[in-house]
Every structure is written in structure tokens, then in C-alpha cells.
Amino acid sequence: MTAKSHKALNFEAAMTELEGIVADMEAGKLSLEHSLTAYQRGAELLAFCRNRLDDAQQKVRILEGDVLKPYITETGAA
């Protein structure tokens, strides 16, 4: 992906696009050539999403004083 597409893309949009690629590939809708292109795009999107998640986790660590705490719901389940 180019720097421009990184700026225009957010996590949710990347996940939506990635889910669409996976669905098309699983359904066998793509030719071999298109499958390879889709796979490459999917790998780029996956790296983008992982990077955003890592960034978010780092921010949470900073906010929590580097001690991650389990998420407890209102029902008390983690």
C-alpha cells in the first residue's frame, strides 16, 4: 500500500475490505491471477490492522501504567 492509501484507510475499513477478500477467495469467485492479487492485498491489509492493534495496545499499556488488567463485563465475566 502507498503512504496515501495508509492515510485514507482506517482500521474498520481495512477489516471490512479484508473480510470481503477472504469471502471472495473462500467462495472460489476469483481466477488464479486475481487470487494472487487479492492475497497480496489481504496481506497488506492484515499488516496494517496488526500495526494499528499493536499501536492501540501500546497506548493502553501507557494508560494503565504498563500493567494490563483483564476486562470485566457488567456480569463479571472476563
Image (cartoon, grey):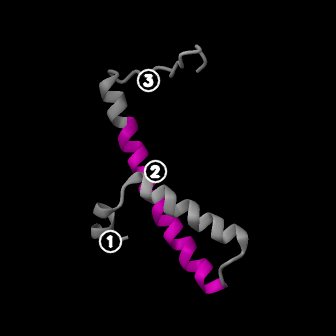
The earlier-in-sequence mark between 2 and 1 is 1
Residue 36 percent coordinates (x, y): 59, 79
Q: Which residue is mark 3?
A: 68
Q: Residues within 10 Å of mark 2 (few under 14, many from 20)?
A: few
* SS at badge 3: loop
Residue 40 percent coordinates (x, y): 52, 72
* SS at badge 1: loop
Drawn side of residue 35 relative to residue 66, left or right: right
Q: Residue at x 70, y 67 (%)?
A: 26
Distance between the Cα atoms at labels 2 and 1? 17 Å
Q: Residue at x 57, y 71 (%)?
A: 39
| Circle 2: residue type | Arg
Q: Which residue is mark 1?
A: 2
Which residue ends up furthest to the front in the rendered image? 74
| Circle 3: residue type | Leu
Residue 33 belongs to magenta span: yes
Residue 51 percent coordinates (x, y): 40, 51
Reply above or below: 7 against 77.
below
Q: Which residue is mark 2?
A: 50
Drawn side of residue 21 relative to residue 44, left or right: right
Reply above or below: 52 against 1.
above
Residue range (magenta): 32-57
The earlier-in-sequence mark between 3 and 1 is 1
Residue 5 belongs to magenta span: no
Q: Quadrant of residue 24?
A: bottom right
* SS at badge 2: helix
| Quarter of the rendering occupied by the N terminus | bottom left
Report the front residue among 55 and 71: 71
